[in-house]
């Protein structure tokens, strides 16, 4: 099976198109839709607006994060080039519209162009969050706490039948073109297979929806048995992939505390583990492997080891904060993708600690919520015995990034692919294919002694 080709500016798989014009057209469309349709204001959107406007400092930051965007950066413009989202009030109106709309596969006005916006709220904030005021505003705990109910409402919509309109064939996510693209992203080097051969569909005979009842049900779809076999299931010296993902970096000698806002975004275990000193002390001097899940990736997680669940912790955090080094004057064109190490310290995240059999010992896996992909659901419990390939949980409403953290006695030697990282510990994730779920990622190199708590 061959997948249709896409241009560089269409970039299927990324959460936002690389093409600024695609984002610009989409935002303009949302502004026009919000203005044309008199939607009732969502109560939590209104509460957030009132909260910001009642605080003079927050109100100033909220306005300035839009006005500080240089005019050379499209943030939604009308035909004569005047920016359409240059104030907080317009953002609120557009936000109110977005949270009752599922992410569309095609641009509404051009069915021949793949312009998927996987992070719709993030798209609106793509440039504002990188301004001086935006960096401050979205880092504030009070702002994130007040914004959380809006995302919960959005998540409820995406998990409801009201969201399944964007799935409808022929132009939705279960249409033939989308099926080819999603199936192609899962084929990797395996045999050619169609979408319904790879994924479990509730009703493969349903021509419009394949039996999927919501956007979230579609995006958390399961592989069929045998699609991702567990490699070396009984070898405790081999670490498997917990997510279908592209390798980002492997950093050793990680510090207990570090300045994660620096340009190179070093890991800070205190921040990553939400200041739980028991785990900080155990893992300091150890290593972190991080990988990226694209919009078309598989969104469920599997255990990379055999062992027992030691602990599970959900950490509240930020939603639209990015590394200051990725803001203006040279902003990340697809925020917050270039802030992934930074997000391990600040974003909403779910952490599972596993006492692995063999030389790996106690390890942690940090599943990171990026932007509106903030819901991490664990499907295992503390004390549960797990084996390689057992499901641990899932991201809802899309994919994200994750880290595996190891003690100082564990050194990894990576298989091909991905091979050993560059001298600075990184891989170019944007050009790397996903590593299959459950495949053998790395071998453990001669541990010194047991890594247990």
Image (spheres, grey):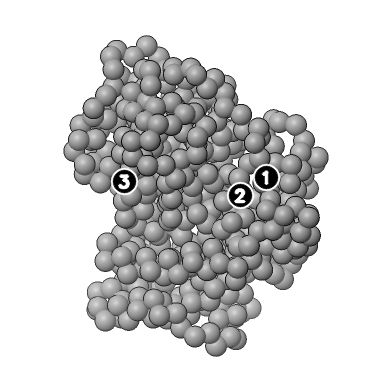
Q: CA distance from mark 1 to mark 3?
A: 30 Å
Residue placed at 40% from the left, 31% from the top? 385
Q: Which residue is mark 3?
A: 313
Q: Is residue 148 above or below residue 19?
A: below
Q: Is residue 288 above or below residue 94?
A: above
Residue placed at 60% from the left, 62% from the top? 214
Q: Earlier in the sequence, mark 1 or mark 2?
A: 1
Q: Which residue is mark 2?
A: 221
Q: Nearer the viewer, residue 7 or 405?
A: 405
Q: Earlier in the sequence, mark 2 or mark 3?
A: 2
Residue 203 picture quarter: bottom right
User: How busy is the neighbourhood of tag 2: few (under 14 within 10 Å), some, or many (20 plus)?
Assistant: some
Q: Secondary structure at mark 1?
A: loop
Residue placed at 55% from the left, 30% from the top? 438
Residue placed at 59% from the left, 80% from the top? 32
Measured as percent of width and height from the top left, residue 150 is found at: 41, 70
Q: CA distance from mark 1 to mark 2?
A: 7 Å
Q: Nearer the viewer, residue 211 or 450?
A: 211
Q: Are marks 2 and 3 in contact (CB under 8 Å)?
A: no
User: How busy is the neighbourhood of tag 1: few (under 14 within 10 Å), some, or many (20 plus)?
Assistant: some
Residue 340 in view in this figure: no
Q: Are marks 1 and 3 in contact (CB under 8 Å)?
A: no
């Amino acid at each position: 099976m061959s997948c249709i080709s896409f241009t560089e500016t269409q970039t299927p798989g990324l959460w936002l198109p690389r093409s600024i014009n695609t984002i610009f057209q989409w935002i303009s469309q949302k502004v026009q839709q919000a203005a044309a349709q008199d939607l009732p204001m969502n109560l939590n959107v209104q509460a957030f607006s009132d909260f910001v406007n009642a605080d003079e400092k927050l109100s100033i930051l909220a306005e300035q994060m839009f006005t500080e965007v240089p005019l050379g950066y499209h943030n939604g413009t009308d035909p004569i080039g005047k920016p359409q989202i240059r104030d907080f009030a317009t953002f609120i109106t557009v936000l109110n519209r977005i949270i009752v709309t599922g992410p569309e596969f095609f641009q509404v006005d051009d069915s021949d162009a793949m312009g998927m916006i996987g992070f719709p709220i993030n798209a609106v904030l793509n440039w504002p969050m990188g301004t001086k005021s935006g960096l401050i505003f979205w880092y504030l705990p009070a702002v994130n706490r007040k914004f959380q109910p809006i995302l919960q409402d959005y998540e409820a919509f995406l998990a409801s039948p009201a969201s399944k309109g964007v799935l409808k064939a022929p132009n939705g996510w279960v249409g033939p073109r989308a099926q080819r693209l999603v199936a192609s992203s899962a084929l990797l080097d395996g045999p050619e297979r169609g979408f319904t051969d790879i994924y479990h569909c509730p009703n493969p005979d349903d021509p419009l929806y394949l039996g999927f009842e919501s956007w979230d049900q579609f995006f958390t779809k399961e592989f069929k048995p045998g699609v991702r076999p567990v490699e070396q299931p009984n070898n405790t010296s081999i670490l498997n992939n917990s997510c279908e993902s592209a390798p980002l970096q492997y950093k050793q000698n990680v510090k207990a505390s570090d300045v994660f806002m620096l340009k190179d975004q070093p890991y800070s275990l205190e921040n990553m583990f939400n200041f739980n000193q028991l785990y900080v002390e155990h893992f300091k001097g150890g290593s972190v492997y991080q990988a990226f899940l694209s919009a078309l990736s598989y969104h469920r997680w599997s255990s990379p080891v055999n062992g027992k669940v030691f602990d599970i912790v959900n950490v509240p955090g930020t939603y639209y904060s990015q590394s200051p080094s990725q803001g203006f004057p040279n902003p990340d064109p697809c925020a917050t993708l270039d802030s992934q190490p930074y997000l391990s310290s600040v974003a909403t995240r779910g952490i599972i600690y596993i006492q692995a059999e063999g030389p790996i010992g106690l390890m942690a896996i940090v599943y990171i919520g990026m932007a509106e992909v903030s819901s991490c659901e664990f499907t295992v419990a503390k004390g549960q015995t797990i084996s390689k390939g057992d499901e641990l949980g899932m991201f809802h409403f899309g994919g994200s990034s994750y880290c595996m953290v190891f003690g100082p006695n564990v050194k990894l030697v990576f298989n091909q692919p991905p091979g050993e990282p560059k001298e600075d510990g990184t891989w170019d994730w944007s050009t790397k294919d996903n590593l299959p779920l459950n495949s053998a990622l790395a071998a453990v190199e001669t541990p010194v002694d047991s890594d247990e708590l």
